[in-house]
């Protein structure tokens, strides 16, 4: 970033101009203040913010706005708690400063709270997608979610077959309202969603 001369404008404000690269083009950025020091301070604050990047919340929200409609409704339901947890965990933290260790520790806290393996894996998947989006938007150079692993030893349950009494109850009520629906689910293996 090259700084041009600070000058005083006709309206009495001081102006500091800098040339920056945005989307591959040189762009002039100006900062104003009642004093030279105020204008320079505003420029330095802006530069510090640029160096640390956007907050995680801004990138995650942009990812959600862009990709949410492309995701199936059932997947949205499973992604939503993971996204909310990620926003709660990393919300205002600069996205460039998040490390693989931060993500691993976050998953270890989930493990300590007895989250299931599937929930933690979805959380990591959502983080991975957000960081991939951040790379494409120029907010990061790497994906810190590519390295961490879901902690071992988390509970993982398989779905159990209903008991014989429940199956018989469905068979007996096939002609009732919604009985055919339950019957179809039973014999096709489909789920309600």
Image (spheres, rainbow, N blue to C red):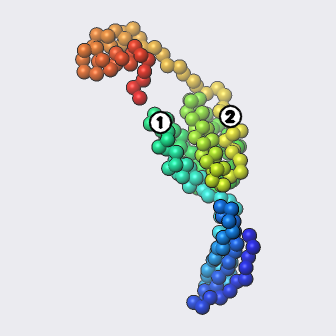
Residue 126, image x, y percentages: 58, 40
- Residue 23, above or below 190: below
What residue lies at 73% left-to-right and 79% top-to-bottom? Answer: 4
Quadrant position of the N terminus in the picture: bottom right
Residue 27, image x, y percentages: 66, 70
> In the drawing, does residue 107 fall left or right of residue 188?
right
Work out whether residue 75 can be spotted.
yes
Res 58 quadrant in image: bottom right
For disc 2, the marked residue is 149
Q: Element type at marker 1?
A: loop
- Residue 22, above or below 15: above
Measure the C-alpha gap from mark 2 to mark 1.
25 Å
For disc 1, the marked residue is 72
Of callouts 2 and 1, which one flags the residue occurring earlier in the amino acid sequence?
1
Res 19 quadrant in image: bottom right
What residue lies at 61% left-to-right and 48% top-to-bottom? Answer: 133
Which residue is the extreme one toward the right?
A: 2
Front position in the image: 23 or 104: 23
């Amino acid at each position: 970033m090259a700084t041009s001369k600070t000058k005083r404008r006709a309206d009495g404000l001081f102006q500091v101009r800098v040339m920056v690269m945005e989307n591959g083009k040189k762009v002039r950025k100006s900062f104003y203040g009642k004093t030279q020091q105020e204008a320079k301070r505003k420029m330095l604050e802006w530069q510090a913010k640029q160096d640390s990047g956007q907050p995680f919340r801004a990138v995650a929200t942009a990812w959600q706005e862009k990709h949410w409609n492309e995701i199936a409704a059932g997947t949205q339901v499973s992604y939503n708690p993971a996204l909310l947890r990620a926003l709660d965990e990393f919300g205002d933290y600069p996205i460039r400063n998040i490390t693989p260790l931060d993500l691993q520790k976050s998953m270890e806290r989930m493990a300590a709270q007895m989250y299931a393996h599937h929930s933690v894996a979805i959380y990591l998947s959502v983080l991975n997608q957000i960081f991939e989006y951040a790379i494409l938007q120029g907010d990061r150079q790497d994906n810190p979610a590519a390295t961490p692993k879901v902690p071992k030893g988390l509970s993982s349950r398989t779905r159990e077959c209903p008991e014989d009494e429940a199956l018989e109850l469905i068979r007996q009520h096939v002609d009732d309202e919604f009985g055919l629906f339950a019957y179809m689910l039973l014999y096709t293996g489909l789920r309600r969603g």
